[in-house]
Image: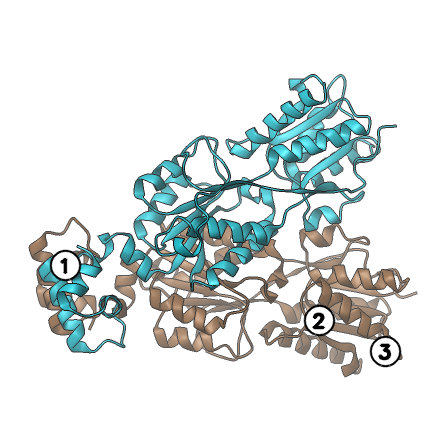
Chain colours: A cyan, B brown
Amino acid sequence: MSIRDLARHLNISIGTVSRALNGRSDVNPETRRRVFEAAAAIGYVPNQSGRSLRQGTTNSIGFVVETNSETSLYGDTFFTSVYAGVQQVFARHHLDLIVLLCPFDQDPLEHLRRVVSRRFVDGLFISAIQRRDPRIDHLIESEIPFMALGRSLSGGTHPWIDLDFAGVAHASIHRLVERGHRRIGLVTAGSELNLGYVFADGYREALAAEGLSFDPDLVIRAETSEMGGYDAVDRLLKLPERPTAVLLVNEIMAIGVYRRLHEAGLTPGRDMAVIGFRDSPQSRFLSPPLTCFRIELSGLGRRLAEGLLATMPAYRDQHPIGLVQEIWPMHLVAGESDPPLR
Amino acid sequence: MSIRDLARHLNISIGTVSRALNGRSDVNPETRRRVFEAAAAIGYVPNQSGRSLRQGTTNSIGFVVETNSETSLYGDTFFTSVYAGVQQVFARHHLDLIVLLCPFDQDPLEHLRRVVSRRFVDGLFISAIQRRDPRIDHLIESEIPFMALGRSLSGGTHPWIDLDFAGVAHASIHRLVERGHRRIGLVTAGSELNLGYVFADGYREALAAEGLSFDPDLVIRAETSEMGGYDAVDRLLKLPERPTAVLLVNEIMAIGVYRRLHEAGLTPGRDMAVIGFRDSPQSRFLSPPLTCFRIELSGLGRRLAEGLLATMPAYRDQHPIGLVQEIWPMHLVAGESDPPLR
C-alpha cells in the first residue's frame, strides 16, 4: 500500500496526501482528517512505504564518512571539495546533501544499518571502503540507491568511483626509476581499507614493469597519519640496505616522513626521495615541496552525484549514463622532493 | 495537542502511540487503527507534536555548516575536531551527529527552514553566526533545541559558545606593543559574520587600553581566505604610512599575507610582523612560523554537546549545567612572525 494508492483512493493529489501526513499547515483540517482516516482504514504505514514515499519526502542524500579515522587519509579539504561538487549537481534537483558521521570507534555496518532504518535519505554515498565491505551487501539487500567512493571485493554491479591508486604507483615508480632510483620503499595503509591493497598491487606491478625485483622488507604498512609516516621511515632507516626513495599512500604521512628524516640528520629529497599521494594545502608548505598528484575534486563530486542519480528512478532519465564504475584520474605535480639520485 | 494528550485520550502508553504513528510493525493493527482515528478526530499533527515525539524517533542531532563559505575561515580541520568532541558526549546517549550542509549560494534561513520542517533531528547546532541571524529567531519560534557556535545580536536566552575573538585581539595588541609596535593593522571579516565585528571591537578596545589612537585606515575588511589576506596587505602597503604589524582574524589569510609581502620584496616578520588567529596545520608550515592561538577543539565540541543536551528534556537531568553562554579560551602559541620592532 503506497502513498499513490492512498491518493487514488481519496482522489486527491499525492502532494496533498504527503503534506497532510507530514503535518504541513498548508493543508486544510478537513482534508487532513480525511487523509488520516483513509490511511487508518486501508492500513497505510508511512515509514514502510518504500522508496517512492522516501524520495517524495526526504529530498536528501546522505554521505557516510568516518570521523577521526583513516578517511582523514584524504585530509579534510578532500571531502569539503567533493561535497561542493556534489551540491552543484544536487542544486538542480533541489536535493540536500547531509553528512552522516560514523564515529571511529563504532562498527561502520551498525552505523549504516541505523542510517538506513531511519529513512533520512533517498540515497547514500559511502566512503572508506574496506577490501570486503559488508555495508555494500546491506545496501544492496535494502534496495537503497548508493554510490561507493572506492572499489571493493564486495558487491559487483553497484556504482563506484575510485581514485587512481594504481596509476599513481605506476607513474611514481617510473619517475623514480628514470631518476636513477632502484631501491624504492612503499608506505601503504595498514588497515583493511581497499585502497591500501590496490596501491600495493600497483607498486608490485610497476616494479615488474621496470624490471625491478620486489623486496617485501621495503613495504611498510602504517597508519595513514603524520605518526604513521614517522614510524614508517623509522623502520626503513633500520634496514641493512635502506631505500633511496619512498612512495606514500597519503600526503599527511609526508609530514612525519620529513620529521623523522630531519631527526636522523637527513634531508628529504637529497638523502631520500619522497613522493606523496595527493596535492593538498599541507604538502605545498613542506620544504622541499612534495612531488604529488592533483585530483579535480569538485569534478569528482559532480561525477559521484551523477552516478548515484543515474541509479534512482526519479532522476535517471536526466542522467542517462548507466552504471558508473570508474577510476578517477590524478595528475603529477612535480615538486622538489624527488631529485635524481646522485 | 501533544502525543501525550493523544495517549491519555486513548488510555494507552505514549510509546505505543509513537510506535503506531511511526508505522512500527510491533503494534497490532487494531491499535494502529484506533491511534490513527483518534489522531484525526482530535486534530493531532505528528510533525508539530513537539519535542517528545521527535526525541523518541530520530536520536539524531544536526550540525549546520555552510560549505565553501567563510566558515572555511576555520579551516577544515576545525569542524572535524569539533565533531569528534561532540560525538564523545553523544556516544553515551546513543545519539548520532549528522552534518547538514548549506550550499554557499543558498539562503541559510531557507536551508534551515527546510531542515526544521523535515524533522530529521531532535536538536541542532548552528555555525557561521551572523551579526543579526534570523535563523536564531526561527529556531526559537519552532521550539527546536539548539546551540549556536558564535554570539549574535539575535536571540538572547539561547545557548551559545563563542571563540575568544576579543581576548585574542587584546593579547595580540599587548604583545605587539611590548615589542615596540605602535602602528598595527587589523584584517577582519568583510561579511556579516558576527565574529568580524567582535574582533574589530576587541581591537579598538585593546588599542585604547594601550593608549594608542585608532586609525580607521588600518582596518581592512576582507574575505577570510588566502586571497583576502593577499588583498588586505596590498591595501596596507599602499598607505602613506604603512603599519609595522598586522593582526588577522583568520590563519588561512596568513598564506596570502606572506605571499604579498614576498612579492613586495618584504620578509614576513622582519618587515611586517604578523599574528594569525588559530593554530592550524597550515600555519605550522609557514616560514617564519606564525604566531597564533591554540584552541582545544575536542573540548569545545564536548562543551557544545553538553550545552545543547542541557536544554533538552530527555537529557538535561544528566547535564544539569543550565544555560551555557560561554567564551571559549584560546592560548598564545609564540611563533617567529612577530619579532620586536628594530
- The chain under label 2 reads B
Q: Badge 3, how many Cα within 10 Å: few under 14, some, many 20+?
A: few
Q: Secondary structure at mark 1?
A: loop
**Label at residue B170:** 2
Q: CA distance from mark 1 to mark 2?
A: 57 Å
Q: Are marks 2 and 3 on the same chain?
A: yes
- The chain under label 1 reads B
Amino acid of disc 1: Ser
Q: Nearer the viewer, residue B252 or A331?
A: A331
**Label at residue B268:** none
Amino acid of disc 3: Leu
Judge depth for marks 2 and 3 and give the one in front.
3
Q: Nearer the viewer, residue B283 or B231?
A: B231
Q: Secondary structure at mark 3?
A: loop
| The N terminus of chain B sits in image quarter | bottom left
Residue A273 at x, y percent in the picture: 78, 32
Judge depth for marks 3 and 1 and give the one in front.
3
> Are circles 2 and 3 on residues that touch, CB within 8 Å?
no
Residue A54 visible in the shown view: yes
Q: Badge 1, how many Cα within 10 Å: few under 14, some, many 20+?
A: some
- Mark 1 and mark 2 lie on one chain; the one further toward the N terminus is 1
The structure residue drawn at horizontal position 73% and vertical position 19%, both measured from the top left corner, is A239
Amino acid of disc 2: His
